[in-house]
Structure formats: structure tokens, C-alpha cells
């Protein structure tokens, strides 16, 4: 007999009829011989309605009272669901977060789960009851019973946390879409349902998948090895499995990581090749990485900063033993990468660094928490360590530093973020799970809501990146991609580099004003904003150790004559900034290039 946690979202329980349909489904699962915990969200748009009501009363309602208010939505659903089950002859009992004993931090409106009491739940299950639990809510402690909520969309997190605490065999998330799709079907009509995805991939696709699955739920599933399934409550289709490798045993106390960072990773087997002053036109990255791929060389980080004049710099890292071959490829094609627009500029210049270290922060806790990058840069600067390359993705920030600084960097970061260190974990995971037979790319995403900022001529000394990103974090501005240029320019005898990054469009103006104001004191140049950008990304654990994936993405963009403005990567993600007007075409091109398209038309609600 299996123990299953099923979670039904707002639309799945949006009306009395829907609740009855869900009850039928629950009973079918029980009849098949399973024990069931059912987690429900508030009916339909109830939570939105309650938020609106609160704002009619107060412009800034207290967070405690917001929790008191919002937690009522789920309480309605559990009672109705339980009644509906009983009406059909199925013994059932509803329970609030407090009644179960879902203990969270005392952070109203955004609490993280610390622990879950399982005794009472288990007793009801043994008695043959279906236990219907209110999602999204908990209490601050078993003693003072303050009601907390987990943040919008938090019922997914409740469900997976319950599954982890109860050591359930599976956690099924029922929603109004058929599962997780390769990309947004409104933009790419032939997007396909994925039958499976790894939790690491899901986390990197957070911006694409967050509407379907709360990233915190994915992180719990990964940490505790919960088998997670996302499927439609309207059909019997199997949906998408979110797979996690068998985790290290972890205590159930402090269940949700209260840290924003999960681990510090490092890799000292890296060497860098940089090509300076390659022309800023479509096809250049495709040409370079196409040649690298033909030599069967696996690249790790790829970074292209914003252009200067009409040229770019592109840097990438490879394993140390591949450096010589990578360098030869770069040198061989440099003459072909002349800048035709400016015959005086000469050919691209190749620079190599024989050995460097990459240190990274990893963890889903950084999503939506500004300040993690800033704290990383401050920590490195306080240790007197200069950062060479910076590359960021949704759940990872990587910096390359001198090899001799690596140990100190790791130690300082572990201390600052109160976590332990591990060598790059993905490689070992991929090697350990060859049976998964991973496709190189699992899905593609487009983000049209970002703007690109560039700060010119930032003095190249430790601490500058820390200052810049602390200033933004202090104003609650979340930064997405961050890229530091290769090119070093002397301005009044001071070595400088450009730093570019992307932020949400609504924050761009404020970020520009803040940084412009600091220019005189910090000694940097102009701060420019480009609102008209789009970010396209591909994600796949299978790209680790597989040459040619980046090349194929760049080639797909080149064929469409789309110019790449910035590139940043993590082990399992490659993101490019392109002009906004090309965003959808770019997404369609890369979706096609990786054979993600299918013949089945997937319809999703608007
Ligand atoms: N009802 C809450 C919300 O709308 C929690 C959830 O549905 O997951 O955000
Ligand atoms: Mg949801």
C-alpha cells in the first residue's frame, strides 16, 4: 500500500462541482489501495479577492493580519473537500496547518517550513481516513500558534513538505495544465509536454515553470528525494515526473532551507580563453563555438559582455587539459573574425589563462532574494580576492578567481552563508545517473520583462562589484544576469572594466539613477539602460560534458540573423540577451534547433 500526497490548486477546486470531481478522483486512488493526504489551495481566485479586500481597508495592512485573512481561503476548501468525500462514503477529516503542526519561521506572509508533526496525520491515515490539509499555511510555533503563510503559490510547498515528512511514495500536483512543457505554448505552438525533467532543470527554469510549480517545492523534492508528478486534474494523462537523485539523508528539522544558499561549489580544473574585439554581428559566437564543438571540446562557462563600439569580447572556460586545443582553435579563426566595419581595428586578439578556479553559490533560495550576489562579492572582496569572470543563472552565481585564492574563497563563502562546500555536484550526479539517458536540452524559456544596464569603466579592484550590487539589493532590486567584461581599459591611469546586468524592466530606471548618483564617488563612467531586450535560455542536465550544445544554440540564432548582445551560462543553462523584437523568433528558433517541437497541440488556459 502506497502513501500518496495529492495537491489540488485553486482552479481544480474552483466550484462545488470541481470539488466533487476531485473527491471522485481521490476515492479512486484510495480504492486502488493507497493512503491519501490531500492538500488544497483556496477556491479559484479567492486569495486574490482577499488581498483586494484588504487593500480597500488599508494601504499597508499588517503582515500578521494578512496571514490571518489569507489563511481562511484554504480553510473553506478543506472543509468542503472533506464533506464531499464523506458524502460519497469516504471517511475523511480536514485539518488546518496548526492542527497538523506545520511549524514555520515567524515571518508573516513569507514563512519557510521548519518542521511538520506527523503523529496525528499518521493516526488518521491508519484509521482509514483521507486527511485533507490546508495548503499555504502554518504556525510560528507549537506554543504560540501564530498563523503564518508561505508566500503566494505556497500550497505546492506545503504538499511536498508533507510528502517529505511522511516519507510518502509520491507527491502529485494537480493543476489546470497537462504538466510541464518544453516552452511557453502561447509563443511556440508546437511546445510539447515533457514526460520527465530533473529537479535541477526545473529550478533553472523557474521563470518558465514558476506558474506551474513553486520553486521552493522543487527544492524540497530535490533535497529529500520526493518523487514529484505534475499533472492535469481534468484528465487521466500521466503528466510530468520531476526526478531527483537519491539524496544524502537529511534531518526533517529545518525542513525548508532557511539559508538562501544551499552549497558552495568549486572547481580548480578550469582554464580560460578570451577573444577580444570580435565583431558585434550575428554569427560570430556560432562560428567560434561551432569550431570548438567540431574539435569535440567541452566548454564550461561562456561569457559575452555588452559590446563596446562595434566589437565584443567573448570568454569561455574549458578543462585544463583541453586548453591547448581550445587556444589553437581560437587563434586559427581569429583572422577570419575581422571587424569589416572598421578595417583599422585589426583582428581579434586571443588571451589565455592556464589555470583558474571557479567558485559558485548554488541554491533555489536566491530566487527573488536580492542581496545574495552582493553578499558573495562583498565576502570575496573582504578576503582581498579579485573576481575575474562573473556568470549568473537563476539558481547559481559563479565567479572565476585565481587558483591560489580558491581555498580562501571557499572558506570565506562557507562561513558567510553558513553552508558546507562540495566540489561541483552536477558532474558527479550526471555520471551517477547515466540510466536517465538525458537529452542535452530539456526546455527553452523567454523572458521579455527584463532590461539591460551597463556601467562603463568600473575601476578594476576588489570590492567594486560588491558595492554596486549591495546598493541595488539595499533598494530591493533583484538582479538577474551579471556579466563583467574581459576588456580592460585605462581611464586616467586606472584599469577599468564594464559591468553589465539585467533587472526587471520596472526597476531599470531606479537602478540607473542610483548608480549614476554613485558615479563620482566610485569613479565609474556612464550608466546606460536598454529596455528593449529579451533573454532566451536553454536548460538541460544532459549538456554537462556534451560538446556542441552552445554552438547549436548560437547557430540557430545566427541562421535567423539575430545578434547576441550578452551570453551567460551555468553548468546546465545557457542564456543569451537578444533584441526584444527578436525574442519570440529566437525562442522559436532554438526550440526547433533542439528538436523540442512535437506534433501534438497542447492547449492551456489563458
Ligand atoms: N492560495 C494561495 C495563493 O493563491 C496559495 C496557493 O494557491 O498555492 O497564492
Ligand atoms: Mg500554484
Image (spheres, rainbow, N blue to C red):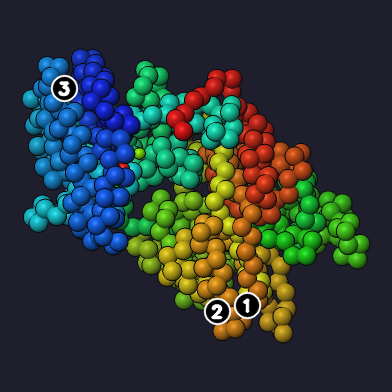
Q: Quadrant of the N terminus?
A: top left
Q: Quick check: 414 left or right of 350?
A: left
Q: Which of these two is toward me, 73 or 578? A: 73
Q: Is residue 404 visible?
A: no
Residue at image x 54%, y 22%?
A: 601
**What residue would you read off at disc 1?**
524
Q: Classify mark 2: residues with Cα within 10 Å, few (<14), some (14-19) or many (20+).
A: some
**What residue would you read off at disc 3?**
85
Q: Classify mark 3: residues with Cα within 10 Å, few (<14), some (14-19) or many (20+).
A: many
In terms of sequence position, does the residue under pointer 2 or pointer 1 come before the other?
2
Q: How far apart, in angstroms, are the residues tagged by discs 3 and 1?
A: 65 Å
Which numbered disc covers residue 336? none
Mark 1 Cβ inside 8 Å of ligand 1: no
- Image location of residue 166, percent across then percent down: 20, 36
**What residue would you read off at disc 2?**
518
In terms of sequence position, does the residue under pointer 2 or pointer 3 come before the other?
3
Q: How many marks?
A: 3
Quick check: marks 2 and 1 in contact, CB under 8 Å?
A: yes
Q: How far apart, in angstroms, are the residues tagged by discs 2 and 3?
A: 62 Å
Residue at image x 37%, y 43%?
A: 214
Q: Quadrant of ligand 2?
A: top left
What kind of element bears circle 3?
A: helix
Q: Which circle, 2 or 1, is nearer the viewer?
A: 2
What kind of element bears circle 1?
A: loop
Look at the picture and state if 290 lies above or below 259.
Answer: above
In terms of sequence position, does the residue under pointer 3 or pointer 1 come before the other?
3
Residue at image x 50%, y 31%?
A: 181
Amino acid at each position: 500500500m502506497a502513501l500518496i500526497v495529492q495537491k489540488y490548486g485553486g482552479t481544480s477546486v474552483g466550484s462545488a462541482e470541481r470539488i466533487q470531481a476531485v473527491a471522485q478522483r481521490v476515492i479512486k486512488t484510495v480504492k486502488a489501495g493507497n493512503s491519501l493526504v490531500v492538500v488544497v489551495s483556496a477556491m479559484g481566485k479567492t486569495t486574490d479577492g482577499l488581498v483586494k479586500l484588504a487593500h480597500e481597508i488599508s494601504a499597508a495592512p499588517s503582515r500578521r493580519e494578512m496571514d490571518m485573512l489569507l489563511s481562511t481561503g484554504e480553510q473553506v476548501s478543506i472543509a468542503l473537500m472533506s464533506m464531499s468525500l464523506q458524502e460519497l462514503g469516504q471517511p475523511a477529516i480536514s485539518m488546518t496547518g496548526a492542527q497538523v503542526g506545520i511549524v514555520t519561521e515567524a515571518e508573516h506572509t513569507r514563512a519557510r517550513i521548519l518542521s511538520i508533526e506527523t503523529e496525528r496525520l499518521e493516526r488518521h491515515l491508519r484509521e482509514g481516513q483521507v486527511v485533507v490539509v490546508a495548503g499555504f499555511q502554518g504556525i510560528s510555533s507549537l506554543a504560540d500558534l501564530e498563523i503564518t503563510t508561505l508566500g503566494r503559490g505556497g500550497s505546492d510547498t506545503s504538499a511536498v513538505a508533507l510528502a517529505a515528512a511522511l516519507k510518502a511514495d509520491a507527491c502529485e500536483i494537480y493543476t489546470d495544465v497537462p504538466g510541464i512543457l518544453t516552452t511557453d505554448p502561447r509563443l511556440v505552438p508546437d511546445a510539447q509536454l515533457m514526460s520527465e525533467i530533473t529537479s535541477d532543470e526545473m529550478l533553472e527554469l523557474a521563470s518558465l515553470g514558476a506558474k506551474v510549480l513553486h520553486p521552493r517545492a522543487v527544492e524540497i523534492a530535490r533535497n529529500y528525494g520526493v518523487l514529484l508528478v505534475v499533472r492535469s486534474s481534468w484528465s487521466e494523462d500521466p503528466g510530468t515526473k520531476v526526478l531527483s537523485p537519491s539524496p544524502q539523508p537529511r534531518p526533517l528539522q529545518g525542513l525548508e532551507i532557511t539559508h538562501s544558499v544551499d552549497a558552495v561549489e568549486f572547481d580548480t580544473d578550469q582554464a580560460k580563453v578570451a577573444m577580444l574585439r570580435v565583431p558585434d554581428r550575428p554569427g560570430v559566437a556560432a562560428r567560434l563555438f561551432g569550431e570548438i564543438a567540431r574539435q569535440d571540446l567541452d566548454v564550461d562557462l561562456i561569457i559575452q559582455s555588452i559590446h563596446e563600439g562595434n566589437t565584443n569580447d567573448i570568454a569561455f572556460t574549458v578543462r585544463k587539459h583541453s586548453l591547448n586545443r581550445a587556444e589553437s582553435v581560437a587563434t586559427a579563426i581569429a583572422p577570419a573574425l575581422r571587424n569589416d566595419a572598421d578595417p583599422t581595428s585589426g583582428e581579434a586578439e586571443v588571451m589565455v589563462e592556464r589555470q583558474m578556479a571557479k567558485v559558485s553559490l548554488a541554491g533555489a533560495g536566491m530566487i527573488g532574494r536580492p542581496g545574495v550576489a552582493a553578499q558573495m562579492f562583498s565576502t570575496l572582496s573582504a578576503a582581498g580576492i579579485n573576481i575575474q569572470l562573473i556568470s549568473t543563472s537563476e539558481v547559481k552565481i559563479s565567479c572565476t578567481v585565481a587558483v591560489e585564492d580558491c581555498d580562501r574563497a571557499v572558506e570565506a563563502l562557507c562561513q558567510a552563508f553558513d553552508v558546507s562546500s562540495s566540489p561541483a555536484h552536477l558532474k558527479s550526479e550526471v555520471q551517477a545517473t547515466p540510466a536517465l539517458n538525458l537529452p542535452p536540452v530539456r526546455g527553452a524559456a523567454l523572458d521579455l520583462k527584463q532590461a539591460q544596464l551597463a556601467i562603463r569603466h568600473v575601476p578594476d579592484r576588489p570590492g567594486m562589484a560588491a558595492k554596486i550590487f549591495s546598493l541595488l539589493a539595499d533598494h530591493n532590486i533583484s538582479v538577474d544576469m551579471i556579466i563583467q567584461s574581459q576588456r580592460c581599459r585605462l581611464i586616467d591611469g586606472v584599469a577599468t572594466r564594464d559591468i553589465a546586468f539585467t533587472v526587471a524592466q520596472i526597476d531599470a530606471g531606479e537602478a540607473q539613477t542610483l548608480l549614476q548618483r554613485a558615479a563620482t564617488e566610485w569613479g565609474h563612467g556612464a550608466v546606460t539602460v536598454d529596455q528593449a531586450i529579451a533573454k532566451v535560455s536553454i536548460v538541460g542536465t544532459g549538456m554537462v560534458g556534451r560538446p556542441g550544445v552552445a554552438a547549436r544554440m548560437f547557430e540557430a540564432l545566427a541562421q535567423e540573423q539575430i545578434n547576441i548582445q550578452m551570453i551567460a551560462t551555468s553548468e546546465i543553462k545557457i542564456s543569451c540577451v537578444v533584441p526584444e523584437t527578436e525574442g519570440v523568433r529566437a525562442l522559436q528558433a532554438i526550440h526547433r534547433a533542439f528538436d523540442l517541437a512535437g506534433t501534438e497541440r497542447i492547449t492551456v488556459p489563458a
